[in-house]
């Protein structure tokens, strides 16, 4: 039976590719809803972008709910310097044909979880963890419904938005601390693994040559100049790793670890301290993924994306 999931997202080019990969995988993934959050760009724009990607995938059957306007405590910081003024530069997509569903994303997460059986929903956050933290605080009764949380965020080594922190956790560290402390199984895709997920020039060309609108948009996003590329050569597919893990877990390796999140407003803000060697003698709260077979990942992604309209 396909895995019921909710994608919580701040599109963003790599979020867009993750959404398309999920759309292309109905045999394995039952995408119940897309919920949006402020992150790469403000939430009005991430919502517009989720709707544009939904149109691209011709998946008007999947509701999009607009979520939190900003982090729990800190003012919102966005990343237009990396993803362009509208968050999806290179995709060349029209304005959305339809609107978001009525109601708040946090309420939608709560309602969908409440309607599910125990262990019935997998949450896939691809941006700051604000919506999830709010849902868990408002309705802790949903926690037993959450089968697992497969998330993109954090870093075992250097950060990308600061020396210490990865963008999603940096933007809302308080929300990340709530999620890492929630007691449900977590699979963490931090920069240690996602910076390995970079498609070759040949693979990007093949995505563009798929002959469908999705392939054209993806290749446009992956070949655009990235002035704020934060030290990586090529466009790392951070967020698609989350969806790829649901589809092909055998491509990834990791370890169960205790992960702590720094919530102070100093230079360590948003740092994820990962106790890889178990020095702290704390019970693991996440499976931290550290390696991906990147070539094989993109071969499989190309095949999937080619099935889209
Ligand atoms: C994360 O930050 C965002 O800019 C990307 O979409 C990804 O989720 C990488 O640090
Ligand atoms: Ca993202």
Image: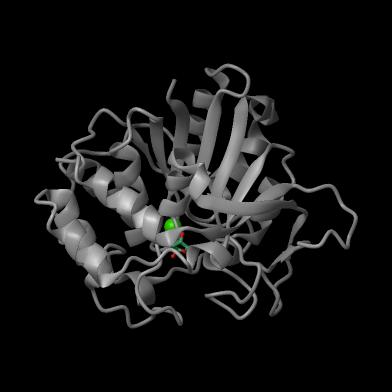
User: Furthest residue to the right?
Assistant: 281
Which residue is depicted at the point 64% across and 54% down?
Answer: 254
- Which of the 4 quarters of the picture holds residue 217? bottom left
Q: Residue furthest left?
A: 211
Q: Quadrant of the N terminus?
A: top left
- Taking the spot 18% from the left edge, 60% from the top edge, the residue there is 206
What percent of the width, then of the height, locates residue 25? Answer: 33, 35
Q: Between 109 and 232, which is closer to the camera in this rendering?
A: 232
Can you tell me which quadrant of the image ligand 2 is in? bottom left
Percent x, y of residue 292:
50, 58
Q: Is residue 158 above or below residue 124?
A: below
Looking at the image, residue 278 lies above or below residue 309: below
In the image, taking residue 163 as reference, residue 60 lies left or right, namely left
Number of numbered tags placed on the structure image: 0
Nearest the eye: 66 or 286: 286
The reply to whether residue 125 is in sight is no
Can see residue 244?
yes
Picture colour scheme: one colour
Report whether 147 appears left or right of 63. Answer: right
Using the rendered view, name the quadrant where residue 133 is placed: top right
Q: Is residue 178 left or right of residue 237?
A: right
Quarter of the figure that contains the C terminus: top left
Residue 191 x, y percent position in the rendering: 55, 66
């Amino acid at each position: 039976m396909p895995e019921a999931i909710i994608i919580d997202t701040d599109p963003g080019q790599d979020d867009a590719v993750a959404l398309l990969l999920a759309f292309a995988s109905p045999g394995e993934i039952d995408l119940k809803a897309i919920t949006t959050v402020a992150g790469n760009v403000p939430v009005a724009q991430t919502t517009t972008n989720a709707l544009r990607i939904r149109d691209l995938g011709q998946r008007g059957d999947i509701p999009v709910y607009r979520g939190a306007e900003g982090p729990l405590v800190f003012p919102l910081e966005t990343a237009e310097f990396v993803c362009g003024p509208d968050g999806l530069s290179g995709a060349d997509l029209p304005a959305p044909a339809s609107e978001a569903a009525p109601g708040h994303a946090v309420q939608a997460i709560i309602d969908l979880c409440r309607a599910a059986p125990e262990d019935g929903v997998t949450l896939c956050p691809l941006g700051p963890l604000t919506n999830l933290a709010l849902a868990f605080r408002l309705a802790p009764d949903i926690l037993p419904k959450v089968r697992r949380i497969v998330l993109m965020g954090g870093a075992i080594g250097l950060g990308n938005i600061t020396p210490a922190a990865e963008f999603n956790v940096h933007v809302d560290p308080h929300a990340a601390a709530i999620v890492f402390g929630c007691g449900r199984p977590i699979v963490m895709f931090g920069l240690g693994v996602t910076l390995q997920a970079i498609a070759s020039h040949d693979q990007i060309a093949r995505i563009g040559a798929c002959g469908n609108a999705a392939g054209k948009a993806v290749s446009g996003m992956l070949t655009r100049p990235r002035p704020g590329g934060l030290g990586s050569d090529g466009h790392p597919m951070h967020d698609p790793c989350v969806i790829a893990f649901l589809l092909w877990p055998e491509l990834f390796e990791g370890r169960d670890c205790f992960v702590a999140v720094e919530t102070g407003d100093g230079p360590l803000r948003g740092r994820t301290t990962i106790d890889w060697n178990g020095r702290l003698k704390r019970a693991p709260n996440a499976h931290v993924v550290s390696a991906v077979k990147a070539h094989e990942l993109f071969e499989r992604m190309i095949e999937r994306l080619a099935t889209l309209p």
